[in-house]
Image (cartoon, helix red, strand yellow):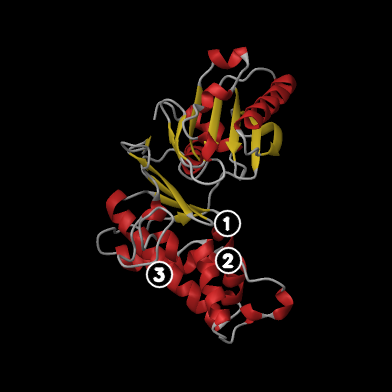
Amino acid sequence: MKVLGIDIGGTRIKAGVVDAAGQIVARATAETPTRMAEFRLTINRLVAELVAREGEPEGVGIGCKGIINPRTTKVEVLPGTFRFLVGTQLSALLEADWARHVPVVADNDARVAMAGEMVWGAAHGLANALLLTLGTGIGGAVVAEGRLLRGASGAAGHIGHLTIEADGAPCLCGNRGCLETVFSARAIEAEAMKAIHLGCETTLADPERGAMPDCRAVFEAAAAGDGVASLICDVAVEKLAAALAGLLHVLDPEVVIVGGEVSAAGEALFAPLRRAVAWRTGRLIKHPVPLVPPQVADRSGIVGAAALLMTLSK
């Protein structure tokens, strides 16, 4: 079995042919155009290139940011540069005749990542699982009783928009005090910039750095003993732990998969997060819930998009 997986990213479109073992046997990429005509041409050029090399696939899975209707593949909500895709049925972009005779499915990028973990990764064989993607924002996906949770409007899994501080900072979603405003790469970097601007004594203000510190640099400074960086990370992790503890009480998952660029901090993030979550949940949830990184090695989104086809019956 070979399936075509397509990831529509903010800077690049990545496509590949994935075999039954979850391995990418061929891939092709291109910069993501910002106009519909060029976008359609690019998608079909990449697909044609892969089909010429590997033959017609048995199905196509597409991952994209925003809110995607999985029944129709229609893009319902997609803020930012690629707003031109709103209202587009992603399956209809494929112009080849063979595409009319195979299943074409689509969903948002976080559920695509979870699909990959369900088929080939940390959620394989589990009935209940939770995934967080910690990056410039926070995404998420839920498996409940063996099914990917999508919700009435397709918005299920937007964990970054849990309200953590009722009177907190404004969020891009229109709410305030969302988890994204206190724990995300942007939020952590903003706290570092604030500390530097206020003149706090910290290695984050090293003039040889040549730029403001990114999220990874803040975690690295904290691990090296920088007091300001440690305080920033400790506060952020406690708030993430509080949100995660609430989700564990509501969803009772068998595993929590924590991915995204912030998870590259490794044990500097995972160790205190595990301790804080265990403390907050220990009375009701007697078994420790594993907090693990993703097991699907592919970070391009191609394998997860292909895995969507495998979860059609879920």
Residue 209 appears in the figure: yes
Q: Residue 16's x, y, as percent?
A: 66, 32
Q: Nearer the viewer, mark 3 or mark 2?
A: 2
Secondary structure found at label 1? helix
Q: Looking at the image, do the residues carrying marks 2 and 1 touch, with CB atoms under 8 Å apart?
A: yes
**Residue 300 placement: quadrant:** top right
Of the 4 image quadrants, the one containing the C terminus is top left
Task: Please name the residue shown 72% across and 73% down the image.
Answer: 210
Q: Residue 177's x, y, as percent?
A: 36, 63
Q: Local crowd at mark 2 within 10 Å, few (<14), some, or many (≥20)?
A: many
Q: Earlier in the sequence, mark 3 or mark 2?
A: 2
**Circle 1 residue:** 261
- Inter-mark Cα distance, 3 to 1: 19 Å
Q: Classify 161 as above or below 25.
A: below
Task: Please name the residue shown 43% across and 27% down the image.
Answer: 312
Task: Please name the residue shown 36% across and 61% down the image.
Answer: 176
Of the 4 image quadrants, the one containing the N terminus is top right
**Circle 3 residue:** 238
Closer to us: 46 or 75: 75
Task: Please name the residue shown 45% across and 43% down the image.
Answer: 123
**Circle 2 residue:** 215
**Residue 101 placement: quadrant:** top right
Q: Earlier in the sequence, mark 2 or mark 1?
A: 2
